[in-house]
Image (spheres, grey):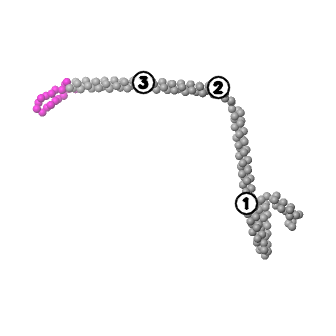
Amino acid sequence: MIPGFKTLKSFSAQIKCMPLSKLFWFLGFLTVIFLGLYVAGYEVLEVIFSLIIVNIAVIEVSRQVDKKKHTESIKNDLTERLASIERICKNIMDHQPRIDHDDVKTIVQEHNKSERDKTDYLFDRMARKSIEIENNVNRMKRTFSGAIGALDDRINEIERNVIVKTDDNQIAELESF
Protein backbone atom coordinates (compact mmCIF):
# COMPACT_ATOMS: atom_id res chain seq x y z
CA MET A 1 0.00 0.00 0.00
CA ILE A 2 1.13 3.56 -0.77
CA PRO A 3 1.90 5.59 2.37
CA GLY A 4 -0.64 8.34 3.14
CA PHE A 5 -3.53 6.42 1.55
CA LYS A 6 -5.62 4.03 3.60
CA THR A 7 -7.09 2.08 0.72
CA LEU A 8 -6.64 1.68 -3.01
CA LYS A 9 -10.05 3.29 -3.45
CA SER A 10 -8.91 6.48 -1.72
CA PHE A 11 -5.77 6.45 -3.90
CA SER A 12 -7.82 6.25 -7.13
CA ALA A 13 -10.18 8.94 -5.83
CA GLN A 14 -7.18 11.16 -5.13
CA ILE A 15 -5.87 10.60 -8.65
CA LYS A 16 -9.28 11.47 -10.18
CA CYS A 17 -9.38 14.75 -8.23
CA MET A 18 -5.78 15.52 -9.11
CA PRO A 19 -5.30 18.18 -11.81
CA LEU A 20 -3.89 16.79 -15.04
CA SER A 21 -0.58 18.60 -14.66
CA LYS A 22 -0.03 17.01 -11.25
CA LEU A 23 -1.05 13.64 -12.65
CA PHE A 24 1.52 14.07 -15.44
CA TRP A 25 4.28 14.82 -12.94
CA PHE A 26 3.14 11.98 -10.67
CA LEU A 27 3.26 9.48 -13.58
CA GLY A 28 6.62 10.90 -14.66
CA PHE A 29 7.93 10.35 -11.12
CA LEU A 30 6.61 6.74 -11.14
CA THR A 31 8.26 6.19 -14.52
CA VAL A 32 11.60 7.38 -13.12
CA ILE A 33 11.19 5.06 -10.09
CA PHE A 34 10.44 2.10 -12.35
CA LEU A 35 13.40 3.02 -14.58
CA GLY A 36 15.55 2.87 -11.45
CA LEU A 37 14.09 -0.56 -10.63
CA TYR A 38 14.79 -1.69 -14.23
CA VAL A 39 18.39 -0.54 -13.92
CA ALA A 40 18.57 -2.42 -10.61
CA GLY A 41 17.66 -5.60 -12.46
CA TYR A 42 13.90 -5.96 -12.04
CA GLU A 43 11.79 -6.95 -15.04
CA VAL A 44 9.50 -3.88 -15.22
CA LEU A 45 10.00 -2.84 -18.83
CA GLU A 46 6.31 -3.39 -19.71
CA VAL A 47 5.27 -1.20 -16.78
CA ILE A 48 7.63 1.56 -17.92
CA PHE A 49 6.20 1.48 -21.45
CA SER A 50 2.68 1.43 -20.01
CA LEU A 51 3.45 4.47 -17.85
CA ILE A 52 4.91 6.30 -20.85
CA ILE A 53 1.78 5.54 -22.92
CA VAL A 54 -0.48 6.66 -20.04
CA ASN A 55 1.65 9.81 -19.68
CA ILE A 56 1.18 10.55 -23.40
CA ALA A 57 -2.59 10.04 -22.98
CA VAL A 58 -2.59 12.43 -20.00
CA ILE A 59 -0.75 15.02 -22.06
CA GLU A 60 -3.34 14.71 -24.87
CA VAL A 61 -6.28 14.89 -22.44
CA SER A 62 -4.68 17.90 -20.75
CA ARG A 63 -4.27 19.59 -24.13
CA GLN A 64 -7.91 18.92 -25.01
CA VAL A 65 -9.11 20.25 -21.64
CA ASP A 66 -6.98 23.38 -22.02
CA LYS A 67 -8.32 23.87 -25.53
CA LYS A 68 -11.88 23.48 -24.27
CA LYS A 69 -11.26 25.95 -21.43
CA HIS A 70 -9.69 28.39 -23.85
CA THR A 71 -12.62 28.02 -26.25
CA GLU A 72 -15.09 28.52 -23.42
CA SER A 73 -13.23 31.59 -22.18
CA ILE A 74 -13.25 33.06 -25.69
CA LYS A 75 -16.95 32.21 -26.01
CA ASN A 76 -17.69 33.87 -22.66
CA ASP A 77 -15.64 36.92 -23.63
CA LEU A 78 -17.47 37.21 -26.96
CA THR A 79 -20.82 36.76 -25.23
CA GLU A 80 -19.95 39.56 -22.80
CA ARG A 81 -18.86 41.82 -25.65
CA LEU A 82 -22.02 41.06 -27.61
CA ALA A 83 -24.15 41.82 -24.55
CA SER A 84 -22.24 45.10 -24.12
CA ILE A 85 -22.82 46.03 -27.77
CA GLU A 86 -26.52 45.19 -27.42
CA ARG A 87 -26.76 47.40 -24.31
CA ILE A 88 -25.06 50.26 -26.14
CA CYS A 89 -27.40 49.88 -29.13
CA LYS A 90 -30.42 49.76 -26.83
CA ASN A 91 -29.25 52.93 -25.05
CA ILE A 92 -28.74 54.67 -28.39
CA MET A 93 -32.17 53.62 -29.59
CA ASP A 94 -33.78 54.70 -26.31
CA HIS A 95 -32.18 58.15 -26.43
CA GLN A 96 -32.76 58.69 -30.12
CA PRO A 97 -35.75 60.94 -30.75
CA ARG A 98 -38.74 59.26 -32.26
CA ILE A 99 -39.43 60.40 -35.81
CA ASP A 100 -43.00 60.71 -36.95
CA HIS A 101 -43.87 59.77 -40.54
CA ASP A 102 -45.41 63.21 -41.09
CA ASP A 103 -42.17 64.84 -39.99
CA VAL A 104 -40.21 62.69 -42.41
CA LYS A 105 -42.66 63.55 -45.17
CA THR A 106 -42.28 67.30 -44.58
CA ILE A 107 -38.48 66.98 -44.44
CA VAL A 108 -38.47 65.09 -47.73
CA GLN A 109 -40.82 67.66 -49.31
CA GLU A 110 -38.58 70.54 -48.16
CA HIS A 111 -35.55 68.76 -49.56
CA ASN A 112 -37.33 68.14 -52.87
CA LYS A 113 -38.34 71.82 -53.06
CA SER A 114 -34.79 73.00 -52.42
CA GLU A 115 -33.44 70.59 -55.04
CA ARG A 116 -36.11 71.74 -57.51
CA ASP A 117 -35.13 75.39 -56.86
CA LYS A 118 -31.45 74.57 -57.42
CA THR A 119 -32.32 72.75 -60.64
CA ASP A 120 -34.46 75.65 -61.87
CA TYR A 121 -31.63 78.07 -61.13
CA LEU A 122 -29.17 75.90 -63.04
CA PHE A 123 -31.55 75.59 -66.03
CA ASP A 124 -32.06 79.38 -66.07
CA ARG A 125 -28.31 79.91 -65.94
CA MET A 126 -27.80 77.41 -68.79
CA ALA A 127 -30.48 79.18 -70.84
CA ARG A 128 -28.77 82.56 -70.30
CA LYS A 129 -25.41 81.08 -71.29
CA SER A 130 -26.87 79.47 -74.44
CA ILE A 131 -28.49 82.82 -75.41
CA GLU A 132 -25.15 84.55 -74.82
CA ILE A 133 -23.38 81.95 -77.00
CA GLU A 134 -26.04 82.38 -79.72
CA ASN A 135 -25.58 86.18 -79.65
CA ASN A 136 -21.80 85.74 -79.92
CA VAL A 137 -22.24 83.41 -82.90
CA ASN A 138 -24.60 85.92 -84.61
CA ARG A 139 -22.15 88.76 -83.98
CA MET A 140 -19.36 86.61 -85.38
CA LYS A 141 -21.48 85.84 -88.48
CA ARG A 142 -22.08 89.56 -89.04
CA THR A 143 -18.37 90.28 -88.61
CA PHE A 144 -17.42 87.54 -91.05
CA SER A 145 -20.05 88.63 -93.58
CA GLY A 146 -18.82 92.25 -93.21
CA ALA A 147 -15.23 91.07 -93.68
CA ILE A 148 -16.20 89.04 -96.74
CA GLY A 149 -18.15 92.03 -98.14
CA ALA A 150 -15.15 94.32 -97.58
CA LEU A 151 -12.87 91.78 -99.25
CA ASP A 152 -15.28 91.59 -102.21
CA ASP A 153 -15.27 95.39 -102.50
CA ARG A 154 -11.46 95.48 -102.47
CA ILE A 155 -11.26 92.75 -105.11
CA ASN A 156 -13.74 94.69 -107.32
CA GLU A 157 -11.71 97.87 -106.86
CA ILE A 158 -8.50 96.10 -107.76
CA GLU A 159 -10.15 94.62 -110.86
CA ARG A 160 -11.26 98.10 -111.98
CA ASN A 161 -7.80 99.62 -111.44
CA VAL A 162 -5.93 97.06 -113.48
CA ILE A 163 -4.47 98.47 -116.63
CA VAL A 164 -3.90 96.06 -119.38
CA LYS A 165 -1.08 96.98 -121.65
CA THR A 166 -0.77 95.42 -124.96
CA ASP A 167 2.95 95.50 -125.34
CA ASP A 168 4.77 92.49 -126.60
CA ASN A 169 5.99 90.95 -123.32
CA GLN A 170 3.75 92.62 -120.77
CA ILE A 171 0.32 91.36 -119.89
CA ALA A 172 -0.83 93.39 -116.91
CA GLU A 173 0.33 95.86 -114.28
CA LEU A 174 -1.24 97.02 -111.06
CA GLU A 175 -1.54 100.75 -110.66
CA SER A 176 -2.31 101.25 -107.00
CA PHE A 177 -3.99 99.58 -104.12
Kind of residue indicated by mark 1: Glu
**In the image, is residue 114 above or below residue 63?**
above
**Mark 2 neighbour class, 10 Å CA radius: few under 14, some 14 to 19, many 20 or more:** few
Q: Quadrant of residue 112?
A: top right
Residue 40 visible within the image: no
**In the image, is residue 114 above or below residue 35?**
above
Across and down, in percent, residue 76 comes to 73, 47
Labels 2 and 1 touching (C-beta < 8 A)? no
**In the image, is residue 63 above or below residue 82?**
below
> Magenta stretch?
160-177
Residue occupying the point 72% across, 42% down: 83
Residue occupying the point 74% across, 58% down: 62
Residue lying farthest to the left in this orientation: 168
Gap in Å between the C-alphas at discs 3 and 1? 88 Å
Residue 135 visible within the image: yes
Which residue was labeled with disc 2?
A: 102
Q: Is residue 3 magenta?
A: no
State which tag comes first along the sequence, 2 or 1: 1
128 relative position to 41: left or right: left
Which residue was labeled with disc 1?
A: 60
Which residue was labeled with disc 3?
A: 131
Kind of residue indicated by mark 3: Ile
**Mark 3 neighbour class, 10 Å CA radius: few under 14, some 14 to 19, many 20 or more:** few
Q: Nearer the viewer, mark 2 or mark 3?
A: 2
Q: Quadrant of residue 161?
A: top left
